[in-house]
Image (tube, grey):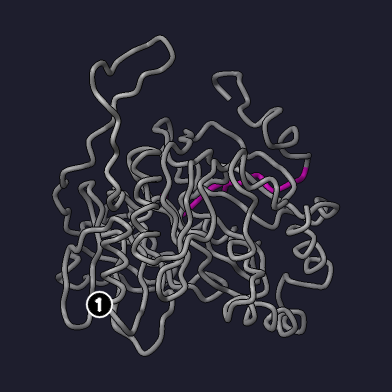
């Protein structure tokens, strides 16, 4: 590391990787994506989805009878694309390539044809599937939505550094303006295969590895993965992946301006009758101040602010996966967030453990014991 300072040391990780462990990046990736572009969902009730989206802080970018595009205040593509479907499901993730040549290079390597995207999005893209079957779209040249007005930044008095005089602090109890999509977290029964696939095909690099306690010799079971932009800092993680008994969406995160916007926006969501899953707190990996909510279709979404940015010089940190290690401060992690509450989704997850143990994947009995231990540590 060029600075000589290891931010992992003494904070949340061991002394980096042990000889022979996963390096956290591919030696010769096909391309290097710049960022996550948007997420795609199918939902049967677009009006209900739009109502929650507005309370959460999105703005409608486009709306038809069968499609809803939601955006943040920053210039760029929509954050979320929701299409009408018979059931609620996560349909895939799109990443932004550096240019159209990278899309063609990826098409040539994978043998999958690139194609023009729908006119509502513009540009070109290629649709791939990761080893767990998740659809991964890589795009270039999509329409750029103009920037919108953002929430005014509050003026803070920091101890004796007084910046606000004869004026009060009154953050509005209103939706927190979503600025942009920050990251998505996915679970896979083929975690290691998926990890290597994303590093090789998209040029992503690992910021932090997590492993089940007592099982480090078997390799990591979760990774926080960022874009490789060289000397330009990128979010600590744009994608996070974890091993589990099903292939599924876990949550997605959307940046807001500051902690007042996040907290007051949460009060607005609560006033509207929506359910907080966990928060407010500050994470360890990524350092974000977070607040998690369930949308009406059961999807977990996060407001965050003040996240870490790393350039390409930082090597991965390594640490055990524990429930108590998810936050530096905040309320205890909830059963809902951990997926062990008595909900339909958690019951499906529990039943899937049996079928996963019988299938040809990375989720075996030892891994199951490690996963069950996480919630108790």
Q: Main secondary structure of the magenta part?
A: loop
Quarter of the image holding residue 172?
top left
Relative to 73, 197 lies left or right: right
Quadrant of the snapshot with the N terminus: top right
Residue 358 percent coordinates (x, y): 76, 84
At x 86%, y 52%, the residue is 214
Relative to 286, 36 lies left or right: left
Instruction: Give SS at disc 1.
Output: helix
At label 1, counting other C-alpha atoms closer than 10 Å, the crowd grade (few under 14, some 14-19, many 20 or more) is few
Residue 366 percent coordinates (x, y): 84, 67
At x 30%, y 82%, the residue is 45
Along the line of sight, the residue nearer the viewer: 112 or 252 = 252
Q: Is residue 73 visible?
A: yes
Residue 174 on the magenta span:
no
The correct choice, above or below, for 63 with respect to 304 in the image is below
Residue 139 percent coordinates (x, y): 30, 61
Quarter of the image holding residue 375?
bottom right
Along the line of sight, the residue nearer the viewer: 110 or 370 = 370
Total count of labels:
1
Residue 224 percent coordinates (x, y): 57, 49
The correct choice, above or below, for 65 with respect to 336 in the image is below
Along the line of sight, the residue nearer the viewer: 289 or 36 = 289
Q: Which residue is mark 1?
A: 47
Q: Which residues, given as a range, are shown in magenta? A: 20-32
View extreme (top): residue? 160
């Amino acid at each position: 590391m060029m600075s000589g300072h290891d931010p992992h040391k003494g904070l949340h990780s061991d002394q980096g990787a042990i000889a022979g462990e996963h390096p956290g990046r591919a030696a010769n990736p096909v391309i290097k994506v710049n960022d996550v572009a948007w997420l795609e969902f199918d939902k049967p009730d677009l009006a209900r989805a739009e109502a929650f989206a507005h309370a959460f802080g999105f703005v409608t970018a486009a709306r038809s009878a069968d499609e809803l595009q939601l955006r943040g205040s920053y210039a760029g593509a929509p954050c979320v694309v929701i299409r009408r479907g018979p059931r609620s499901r996560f349909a895939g993730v799109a990443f932004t390539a550096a240019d159209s040549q990278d899309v063609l290079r990826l098409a040539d390597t994978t043998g999958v044809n690139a194609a023009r995207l729908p006119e509502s999005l513009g540009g070109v893209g290629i649709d791939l599937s990761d080893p767990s079957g998740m659809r991964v779209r890589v795009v270039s040249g999509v329409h750029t939505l103009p920037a919108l007005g953002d929430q005014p930044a509050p003026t803070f008095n920091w101890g004796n550094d007084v910046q606000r005089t004869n004026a009060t602090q009154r953050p509005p109890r209103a939706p927190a303006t979503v600025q942009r999509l920050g990251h998505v977290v996915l679970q896979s029964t083929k975690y290691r295969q998926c990890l290597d696939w994303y590093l090789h095909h998209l040029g992503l690099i690992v910021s932090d590895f997590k492993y089940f306690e007592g099982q480090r010799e078997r390799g990591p079971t979760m990774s926080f993965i960022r874009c490789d932009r060289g000397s330009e800092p990128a979010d600590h993680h744009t994608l996070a992946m974890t091993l589990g008994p099903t292939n599924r969406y876990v949550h997605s995160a959307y940046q807001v301006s500051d902690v007042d916007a996040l907290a007051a926006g949460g009060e607005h969501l609560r006033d509207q009758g929506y359910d907080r899953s966990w928060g407010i707190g500050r994470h360890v990996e990524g350092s974000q101040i977070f607040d998690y909510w369930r949308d009406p279709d059961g999807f977990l979404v996060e407001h965050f602010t003040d996240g870490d940015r790393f350039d390409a010089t930082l090597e991965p940190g390594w640490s055990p996966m524990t429930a108590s290690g998810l936050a530096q401060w905040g309320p205890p992690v909830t059963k809902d967030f951990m997926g062990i509450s008595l909900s339909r989704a958690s019951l499906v997850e529990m039943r899937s453990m049996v079928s996963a143990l019988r299938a040809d994947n990375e989720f075996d009995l030892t891994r199951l014991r490690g996963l069950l231990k996480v919630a108790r540590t």
